[in-house]
């Protein structure tokens, strides 16, 4: 997570998974390894074709095509219905990652739609609070509203958890440092170093 879209580089990820899992290398159990994606369908299919029980996390962030398209342009190429269908076919543990955006995707109707999507593919729902300043133009959903959203999903028979934010106090939460720096000044471009040579 956090280093780009892995399923856009499946050949390298395929090898990395083997090394992570192989007892002669790192020896991490497959069920302790989760590949996180925005929903790149060919990669989901390739991951599902492997015999190991690797887990899959999909960044959903919206329970309808219209809203998801406005938040995540990838939805144009890989529509939500196709992503959910691929998750159902994956036939292993799937998690829906869902960042809570105040007044955008956190209404009662969104909870109902998200629960239905999760039921369609037996997915676990992970609600992620947006930290203050985490993304310019959005505001965090208040804690009590997140809790109510989670209860509404759980009431429909779907497993759900609220992720605990960490690193807020030292500006180390996801994207926080970058957003904070961009708010202060424009990024400085680096100057070329003519005296540095690559052997």
Image (cartoon, helix red, strand yellow):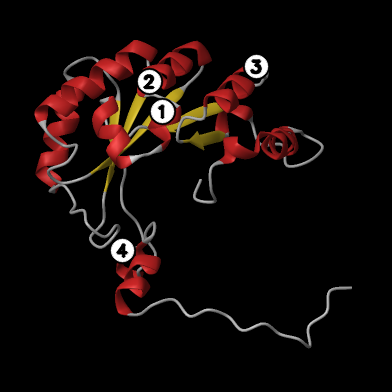
Say left or right for 19 vs 123. right
The residue at which mark 4 appears reads as 168
Residue at position x 82%, y 37% from top?
24
Q: Earlier in the sequence, mark 1 or mark 4?
A: 1
Sort mark 2 into few (<14), some (14-19) or many (20+) by Cα contacts within 10 Å.
many
Q: Are marks 1 and 3 in contact (CB under 8 Å)?
A: no
The residue at which mark 3 appears reads as 49
Q: State the mark number for residue 95.
A: 1
Sort mark 4 into few (<14), some (14-19) or many (20+) by Cα contacts within 10 Å.
some
**Rounded to the nearest whole Å, what is the CA distance between mark 2 and mark 4?**
28 Å
Q: Earlier in the sequence, mark 2 or mark 1?
A: 1
The residue at which mark 2 appears reads as 123
**Rounded to the nearest whole Å, what is the CA distance between mark 2 and mark 1?**
5 Å
Kind of element beneath mark 2 = loop
Q: Are marks 2 and 1 in contact (CB under 8 Å)?
A: yes
Q: Which circle, 1 or 3, is nearer the viewer?
A: 3
Residue at position x 30%, y 73% from top?
183
Residue in the foreground of this view, choosing between 135 and 122? 135
Sort mark 1 into few (<14), some (14-19) or many (20+) by Cα contacts within 10 Å.
many
Vertical position of residue 11 compared to residue 188: above or below: above
Say left or right for 1 vs 178. right
Say left or right for 77 vs 165. right
Q: Position of residue 127 (x, y in %)?
A: 28, 37
Residue at position x 53%, y 48% from top?
4
**Rounded to the nearest whole Å, what is the CA distance between mark 3 and mark 2?**
19 Å
Which quadrant of the rendered structure holds the C terminus?
bottom right
Q: Position of residue 46 (x, y in %)?
A: 63, 22
Kind of element beneath mark 1 = strand
């Amino acid at each position: 997570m956090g280093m780009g879209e892995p399923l856009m580089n499946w050949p390298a990820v395929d090898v990395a998974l083997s090394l992570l899992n192989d007892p002669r290398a790192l020896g991490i159990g497959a069920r302790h390894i989760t590949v996180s994606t925005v929903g790149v369908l060919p990669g989901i299919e390739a991951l599902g074709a492997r015999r190991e029980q690797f887990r899959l996390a999909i960044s959903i962030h919206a329970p309808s095509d219209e809203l998801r398209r406005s938040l995540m342009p990838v939805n144009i190429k890989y529509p939500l219905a196709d992503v959910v269908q691929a998750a159902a076919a994956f036939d292993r543990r799937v998690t829906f990652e869902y960042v809570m955006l105040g007044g955008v995707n956190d209404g009662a109707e969104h909870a109902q739609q998200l629960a239905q999507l999760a039921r369609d593919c037996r997915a676990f729902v992970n609600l992620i609070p947006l930290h203050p300043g985490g993304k310019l133009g959005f505001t965090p959903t208040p804690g009590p509203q997140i809790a109510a959203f989670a209860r509404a999903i759980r009431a429909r028979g779907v497993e759900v958890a609220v992720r605990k934010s960490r690193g807020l106090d030292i500006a180390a939460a996801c994207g926080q440092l970058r957003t904070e720096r961009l708010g202060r000044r424009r990024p400085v471009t680096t100057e070329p170093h003519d005296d540095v040579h690559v052997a």
